[in-house]
């Protein structure tokens, strides 16, 4: 099992729709979760962090966390073509390693078409 | 300048060459990182420095040699690389070395011939 698993996509959604990006992780003891956005040819940029079960909203972005199911998601409302990018899920693993370790998924490529 | 800057943006080198990647952060952070990003693979952490002290070395081959002369500068010295080392090398910084809230540089796209 991959440590942080994401569907590689591409996920194609029409402009104005809700894009839903999903991520599962293998370390039950994880407490810190992050979403990074990476445009083609650019470096990753942190867009959301979440630490508690439930939803966290920031503008058009909502992160959702369910630790019991080891599942974290990112919703993008009113998707825009400028949201087209690869979204990386990252989780700090605490139990499986001697020290806290940030593990990235391979990312989901999102395409928003006009 | 602001943020994290990396040079060069692109590098082509032969397997016998020696080159260095440079990273500078202007954020006042105490931790700096080197990551490797290959196609279809997750970002791989290579090295972590906290206040110029190496705190993590993820079983990286010795042909990659990091150097952190101060908390604002980080180098990655390369020698006798292999073609499979071709990748995007990203530098990042964070306020403290807890791996949280990384700020990435624009990366060096490395090709080893």
Image (cartoon, rainbow, N blue to C red):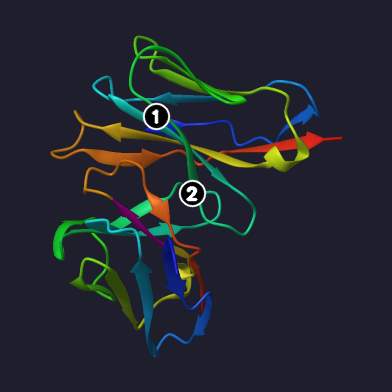
The residue lying furthest to the front in this view is B1
State the separation of the CA atoms marked 2 and 1: 14 Å
Same subunit, tags 2 and 1: no
Main SS category, magenta section? strand
| Picture quadrant of residue B57 | bottom left
Task: Give the residue pinned by disc 2.
Answer: B41
Which residues lie in the magenta part? B90-94
Chain for disc number 2 = B
| Label 2 element class | loop
> Mark 2 or mark 1: which is in front?
2
| Picture quadrant of residue A94 | top left
Q: Nearer the viewer, residue A100 or B12?
A: A100
Report the quarter where the C terminus of chain A lies.
top right
The residue lying furthest to the bottom in this view is B17
User: At x 72% / y 42%, what residue is drawn?
Assistant: A82
Answer whether residue A112 is magenta in the image: no
């Amino acid at each position: 099992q991959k440590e942080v698993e994401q569907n590689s996509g591409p996920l194609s959604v029409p402009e104005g729709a809700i894009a839903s990006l999903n991520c599962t992780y293998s370390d039950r003891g994880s407490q810190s979760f992050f979403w990074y956005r990476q445009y083609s040819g650019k470096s990753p940029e942190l867009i959301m962090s979440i630490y508690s079960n439930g939803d966290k909203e920031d503008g058009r972005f909502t992160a959702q966390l369910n630790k019991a199911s080891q599942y974290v998601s990112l919703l993008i409302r009113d998707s825009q073509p400028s949201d087209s990018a690869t979204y990386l899920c990252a989780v700090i693993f605490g139990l499986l390693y001697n020290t806290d370790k940030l593990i990235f998924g391979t990312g989901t490529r999102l395409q928003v078409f006009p | 300048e602001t943020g994290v800057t990396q040079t060069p943006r692109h590098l082509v080198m032969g397997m016998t060459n020696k080159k260095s990647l440079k990273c500078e952060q202007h954020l006042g952070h105490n931790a700096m990182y080197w990551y490797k990003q290959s196609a279809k693979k997750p970002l791989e952490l290579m090295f972590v420095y906290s206040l110029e002290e190496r705190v993590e070395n993820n079983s990286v081959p010795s042909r990659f040699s990091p150097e952190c002369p101060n908390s604002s500068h980080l180098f990655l010295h390369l020698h006798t690389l292999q073609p499979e080392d071709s990748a995007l090398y990203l530098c990042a910084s964070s306020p403290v070395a807890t791996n949280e809230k990384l700020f990435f540089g624009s990366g060096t796209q490395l090709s080893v011939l």
